Amino acid sequence: MYNSGFSELAKAQAQHTIRVFEDFERVVTPSGSCAAMVKVEYPHLLQGEPQWHERAEQLASRTFELTDFLVNQLGVTDVGAKYEGRVAVHFACHLRMLNQTDEVDRLVSNVAGAKLIPIERRDQCCGFGGSFAVRYAQISGAMVDDKMACILRTDADALVSTDNGCLMNIGGRLHREGQQTEVLHIAELLERR
């Protein structure tokens, strides 16, 4: 709603989310875009409403993207995961909004058997961007084609990211092209034993 310009509906959703999570000590989300919405956009969206703005700020301070929570809050980089193969990382756009840098890489580097493989333009958008992919399908398609080419040049066995939108977009493109690269959310990689 927010990305499509429906600010009043987005405010109502923000207020609902704030009410739902108000009594929780911490909120951890497996999505950088969701974390960015709560941490960055909710306070901005509700800035003109003092009571809601304060509550948005409070929720923002208790909300964490999963890799941020593991690495920066808990100090955990090794969860005992195992994966035999080459792993490339797509750095989802919203992680920049959250000032995250290498949390995913640090986690992948501590997965037994995994070899972290750098990809060209790893922080370049994959073209999904929620409604962007629908409104600008040709541009989005060109962007995901470029991202796929960068991934394929690594000869990675798996692609890992923190955002399901990105993974759905990239994974769908890889699948349509008959590619065998496994596409995993970081949580899926970390649960491998």
Image: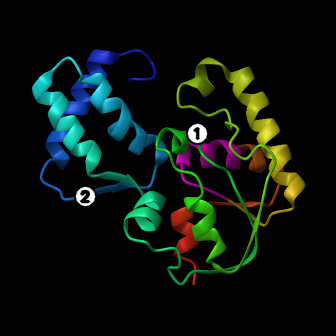
Give the x, y percent position of residue 93: 58, 39
Residue holding disc 1:
93
Residue 16 in the image: above or below residue 29: above
Quarter containing the N terminus: top left
Residue 38 lies left or right of residue 116; in this view the side is left
Q: Main secondary structure of the magenta part?
A: helix
Closer to the camera in the image, 176 or 181: 181
Say how the picture is coloured: rainbow
Q: Is residue 167 magenta?
A: yes
Cα separation, mark 2 vs mark 1, equals 23 Å
Residue 47 lies left or right of residue 169; in this view the side is left
Of helix, strand and loop, which one carries label 1?
loop
Residue 151 in view in this figure: yes
Q: Is residue 175 magenta?
A: no
The kind of residue on which mark 2 rests is Arg
Of helix, strand and loop, which one carries label 2?
loop
Q: Residue at x 13, y 24 (%)?
A: 50
Q: How many marks?
A: 2
Magenta residues span 160-172
Residue 105 lies left or right of residue 12; in this view the side is right
Closer to the camera in the image, 121 or 141: 121
Say the numbered circle drawn on residue 26.
Answer: 2
Say the numbered circle drawn on residue 41.
Answer: none
Q: Residue at x 74, y 37 (%)?
A: 144
